[in-house]
Amino acid sequence: MEDLSDKNESRVSEFIDNPRKAVWKLSLPVMMGMAVYTFYNLTDMFFVGQLGGDALAALTFNMPVVFLAIGIIFGLGTGATSAIARHLGAGNKQAAEDAARQTLVIGLGFAVVLTVVALTLKREIMMWLGASIEISELAIQYFEIAVPGFLFVVLNVCFRSIMTGEGNTRTPVTFQAVGTLLNVVLDPVLIFSAGLGIAGAAWATVISQITVLVIFCVYIFVRKGSYLNLGSGKFTITRSTSKNILRVGMPSSAAMMMMSLGSMFFNRIVSMFGSDAVAGFGIGGRIDSIYFMPTFALATSQVTLAGMFLGAKRVDLVREILRYTILRAQLIAIVCGVCFYLFAPELCSIFSEDERIQQVSTSYVRTIVFAFPFVTVGIISSRVFLGLGSGIPGMLLTAMRVVLISVPSAYVMTRFMGMELQAVWWAMVSAGVVTSVVSYIWISHRIRSVEIHTSSGATTETGLKH
C-alpha cells in the first residue's frame, strides 16, 4: 500500500506542476457529488410536491433555516480547508492535524447550541418567516425532525472539509453520494408507503446523514484512509490554531448567515403574494441549483489550490487558476442560462400541476438566468480570498449583495412602490451583477498585494502577516 505521506507530498507537487489539471482533478469529483445532491433536491421537491402546494410551501419555508445551519458549518469547514491546505503546502503536517482536530471540536459545540436554540424557537421562526398557521404546522413537522439531524450534517461537513484540505475531494464526495442516493430511495417509501407525509422527507434526510457519518468514521478511524491522523496523538486546543481556522471560517460563516437571512426575508416578501408564490419560488430555486452545481464545484477547488500555492510561495499560480477557472465556468453559465430560459415552463411543470405555481417559478427562472455570468465571477473570486486566508472580503461582499442591495430594493419596490413579484427577481439579479464586478476588482488587487508581500518574504504558512 502506498505511503500516505508520500502520496500527499506528490499530490502537492502535482498541483504545482500542472495547476490547470489540478482544477479539474479537484472539481470533477465535487461536480459528480453535487450532481447527485442536486438530483436529490429535485426529486425531494417532486415527491413533496405530490402532497400539494401547501406541503411545497412548508418545505420552502424550512429551506432558509436549513441553509443557515449548513451555511455556518460550511463556513467553518472552509476555514479548516484553507488552513490545512496552507499548512500542507508549507510541509507542516502536525499543524494541519491540529487544525483538523480543532475543527471537529468547534463543529460539535456549534451543532449542540444550534439544535437547542432552533427547537426552542421553532414556532417563532415560522411565524417570523411569514408562514400561515396551517402551513406553519406542516413546516414544523419537518423542522422538528430535521434540526436534531444537524449534528450528523455538521460532522460530515467537517470530515469532508478536512479531506478537501488534503487535496482529496473524490473520497468524501463518494460517501456523500451514497447518502444522497439512499435519501432518494427513502423519500417515496417514507412519504407515501409509510404514510409519514412531509415528516417522511425529513426522516429520509436524517437517516442518510447518519449513514454517511458511519462511513466517514470507518474510513478515517478504522481503515486509516486519511493522510492526517485524527484518531490518536497529542491533542491540545491552541489559540493560534483556532484563530487560524476562525479567521477564515467566521467571516465565511457570517456570509452564509447573511445569505440565509436574505433567503428568509425573500420568503417573507414573496409570501405577501400568497403561498403559491412561495411554492413557485422554492421550485425555481431548486432548478437554478443545477447551474450552481458545477460553479460551486469549480469554486471549491480554488480554496485548496490557492491555499497550497500560497503555502508553497507560488502566488503566480493563484492568478493563473483564477483566470482559467472563470473562463471555463462562464461557458457553463451561458449554456445553463440559455437552456433554462428556453425550457423553463417544461422544467417547472415537472414539480407542480398548479398553473399559478408554474407561472411564478417560470418567471423566476427566466429572470435569474441573466445574473449567471456575473455570479460566476463573484463565487469563484470569493473562494480565492478564502484560500489566501482572508474571510472578511467574502463577508463584506455578501453584505453588499444581500443587506445593501437585494433585500432592501425588493422590499421597497413591492411594499411601497406597488410592483409585482417580478421586481423581487430583478432585485436579486441587480445585486449579483454589482457585487460580482466589485469582487473581481478586489481579488485582482489582493493577488497583486500578496505577490508583493511574498517577494519581500512577508508571508507565513498561515497566510499574510497583518
Image (tube, rainbow, N blue to C red):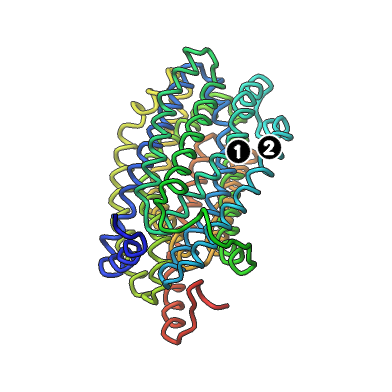
What secondary structure is found at the residue carrying circle 1? helix
Q: Percent from the top left, x then y, of residue 24? A: 29, 55
Of residues 268 and 451, the one nearer the viewer is: 451
Q: Earlier in the sequence, mark 2 or mark 1?
A: 1
Amino acid type of the residue tagged 1 in the rendering: Val
Q: Quadrant of the N terminus?
A: bottom left
Toward which corner of the image does residue 197 lie, by quadrant? top right
Question: Which numbered circle lies on residue 110?
Answer: none
Amino acid type of the residue tagged 2 in the rendering: Ala
Q: Percent from the top left, x then y, of residue 199? A: 57, 22
Find the distance from the CA under tag 2 to the CA under tag 1. 9 Å
Number of other residues with Cα within 10 Å of mark 2, as a class: few under 14, some 14 to 19, many 20 or more = some
- 164 in relation to 10, above or below: above
- 91 in relation to 41, above or below: below
Q: Percent from the top left, x then y, of residue 291? A: 37, 43
Q: Nearer the viewer, mark 2 or mark 1?
A: 2
Q: Percent from the top left, x then y, of residue 218? A: 45, 42
Residue sitting at x 37%, y 23%: 350
Residue sitting at x 48%, y 49%: 159
Q: Which residue is mark 2?
A: 118
Number of other residues with Cα within 10 Å of mark 1, as a class: few under 14, some 14 to 19, many 20 or more = many
**Numbered circles on residues, count:** 2
Q: Which residue is mark 1?
A: 65
Residue sitting at x 37%, y 51%: 169
Residue sitting at x 65%, y 24%: 136
**Is label 2 in contact with label 1 (beta carbons under 8 Å)?**
yes
* Residue 322 visible in the current orientation: no
Toward which corner of the image does residue 129 lie, by quadrant? top right
* Residue 437 visible in the current orientation: yes
